Image (cartoon, rainbow, N blue to C red):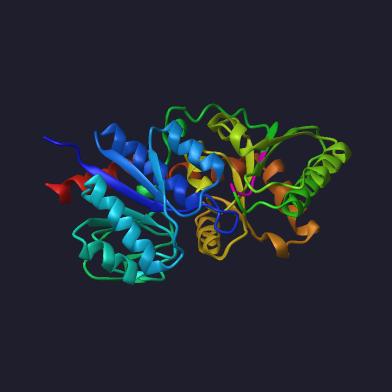
């Protein structure tokens, strides 16, 4: 019996970030563990993303056209040459007209989504966000896999246990995402940490993949009383998230990794699709939503950071609630549904 084959289509850039590709990698890892063959197709990728795919034994084909229909045609041609059964799409450009091209070519189709704004003509829709409901979607009988029960977490995180927290904050992680972080945003947050936390701590700052303004960051580092470490995307490891006692994170896919590790987290919004996630987690008392990063004032940031830092009971409640959202089995549940439809 030949192996089942799956094609993934997603992009990563400084404009859209890296979350689409990273959650595809998480699902692809599980598919590979269960014996599927994988091919990846992209129009835009960070060099680090290409390396991540290669490190996971996933070959990638680059397509040339920015035209939506031509994109679909190129993707279908690759799918035919690879003899796939399933196509997985992750990206806001893959609207119903694109999906119809894929379905019309005879492939089973899974779409990973996080905004519930387009109509779906697909076999499966996966949205791992906590706010979403079936009533938010227009679809033609798609199987809807919704909520953090289906959170897609990568191997390198699942291989680690959450670790023990001693209740004190010694290390803070600042992560604004792989491609959308700015030096200005990082400086604002670290300056607020400086004012909120008097005791000397360690701050790990993910600088992303888009060429941060390191001169400005180094100047900030020299002024801070804390020990600050800047970490490029090529040096980032799951242990950095696992070992954090507190995090300030963009409200994207990184949150489900932090939830798995039960890290008390403040969220900031840097893209429109992140707003409902941040608001929902705040309402569920899983995280503290700081709001839009570019609209925050220093006093407000300082007070929110100070509250989590000083109130140990509140911090532990957040961590427990957050951790209960993600059990690490989400991607297995998704693959189970794919297998059932393939039988």
Q: Is residue 141 magenta?
A: no
**Front-most of residues 292 and 315:** 292
Q: Is residue 127 left or right of residue 100?
A: right
Q: Is residue 175 magenta?
A: yes
Toward the right, the furthest residue is 223
Residue 183 visible in the snapshot: yes
The residue positioned 51% from the left and 52% from the top of the image is: 12
Residue 327 visible in the snapshot: no
Q: Is residue 220 left or right of residue 243?
A: right
The residue positioned 25% from the left and 48% from the top of the image is: 81
Numbered-mark total: 0
Residue 293 spot, x, y in % from top left: 69, 59
**Front-most of residues 242 and 216:** 216
**Residue 328's quadrant in the figure?**
top left
In the rendered view, tell whether residue 45 sits above or below residue 162: below
Check the picture and name the quadrant holding the N terminus: top left
The residue range painted magenta reads 173-178
The residue positioned 19% from the left and 37% from the top of the image is: 3
Q: Is residue 227 left or right of residue 286?
A: right
Residue 114 spot, x, y in % from top left: 43, 60
**Residue 25's quadrant in the figure?**
top left
Residue 198 spot, x, y in % from top left: 82, 38
**Residue 58's quadrant in the figure?**
top left
Residue 207 spot, x, y in % from top left: 67, 43
């Amino acid at each position: 019996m030949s192996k089942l084959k799956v094609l993934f289509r997603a992009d990563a850039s400084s404009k859209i970030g890296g979350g689409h590709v990273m959650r595809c990698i998480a699902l692809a890892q599980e598919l590979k563990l269960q014996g599927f063959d994988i091919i990846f197709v992209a129009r835009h990728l960070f060099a680090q993303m290409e390396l991540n795919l290669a490190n996971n034994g996933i070959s990638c084909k680059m397509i040339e056209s920015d035209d939506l229909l031509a994109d679909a045609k190129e993707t279908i041609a690759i799918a035919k040459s690879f003899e796939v059964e399933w196509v997985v799409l992750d990206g806001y450009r893959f609207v119903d007209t694109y999906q119809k091209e894929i379905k019309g070519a005879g492939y089973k189709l899974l779409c990973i989504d996080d905004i519930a704004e387009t109509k779906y003509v697909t076999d499966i829709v996966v949205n791992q966000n906590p706010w979403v409901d079936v009533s938010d979607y227009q679809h033609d009988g798609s199987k809807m896999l919704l909520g953090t029960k289906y959170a897609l977490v990568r191997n390198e995180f699942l291989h680690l246990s959450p670790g023990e927290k001693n209740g004190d904050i010694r290390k803070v992680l600042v992560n604004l995402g792989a491609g959308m972080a700015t030096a200005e945003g990082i400086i604002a947050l670290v300056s607020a940490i400086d004012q909120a936390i008097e005791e000397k701590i360690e701050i790990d700052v993910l600088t992303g993949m888009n060429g941060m303004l390191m001169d400005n960051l180094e100047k900030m580092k020299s002024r801070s009383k804390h020990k600050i470490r800047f970490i490029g995307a090529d040096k980032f490891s799951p242990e950095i998230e696992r070992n954090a006692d507190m995090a300030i994170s963009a409200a994207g896919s990184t949150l489900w990794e932090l939830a798995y590790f039960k890290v008390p987290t403040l969220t900031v919004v840097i893209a429109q699709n992140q707003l409902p996630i941040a608001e929902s987690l705040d309402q569920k008392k899983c995280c503290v939503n700081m709001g839009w990063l570019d609209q925050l004032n220093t006093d407000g940031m300082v007070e929110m950071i100070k509250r989590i830092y000083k109130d140990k009971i509140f911090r532990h409640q957040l961590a427990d609630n957050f951790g209960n959202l993600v059990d690490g089995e989400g991607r297995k549940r998704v693959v189970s549904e794919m297998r059932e439809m393939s039988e």
